[in-house]
Amino acid sequence: MSDIPELTDDQFKSAIPARQRKRLMQGRFESGEDITALRNFVGLTQAEFARAIEISVHTLRNWEQGRRKPEGPSLALLRIAARHPRIIHENLESVA
């Protein structure tokens, strides 16, 4: 027996492959699916994630649906979210 706990169903659903997470931490978002995967990894709804990084839900939806791509400071925030998801949760609590 191993001391490593089993993943819960919710944890398994929000997991992203290590290769993809590494790419996201480098700021290489290839599609809207990457944004959605990151948001699910962080474990927030669209409204919560948008509020946490202080963008509109409309902007987030445009990213997730591939109509727009994040740039500049937004891209930096997404890289931070991929590296340190807890910071996004902490920020959400401070802007709530």
Image: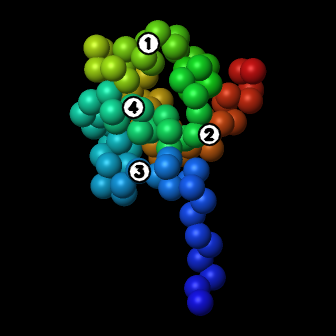
Q: Nearer the viewer, mark 3 or mark 2?
A: 3
Residue at image location 54% in from the left, 45% down from the top:
84
Which x, y percent locates residue 91?
A: 66, 30
> Which element type, helix, strand or loop, lies under badge 2?
helix
Q: Quadrant of the C terminus?
A: top right
Percent position (x, y) of residue 65?
Answer: 33, 20
Of pointers 1 and 3, the one earlier in the residue sequence: 3
Mark 3–mark 2 contact, CB under 8 Å? Answer: no
Label 3: element kind:
loop
Nearer the camera: disc 2 or disc 1? 1
Q: Based on the displayed image, in which of its 4 quarters is residue 30 positioned?
A: top left
Q: Tell me the kind of residue under disc 2.
A: Ile
Q: Is residue 13 visible?
A: yes
Q: Which mark is residue 11?
A: none
Q: Which mark is residue 87?
A: 2
Residue designated by label 1:
59
At label 3, counting other C-alpha atoms closer than 10 Å, the crowd grade (few under 14, some 14-19, many 20 or more) is some
Residue under circle 3?
Answer: 16
**Image quarter for residue 45?**
top right
28 w.r.t. 12: above or below: above
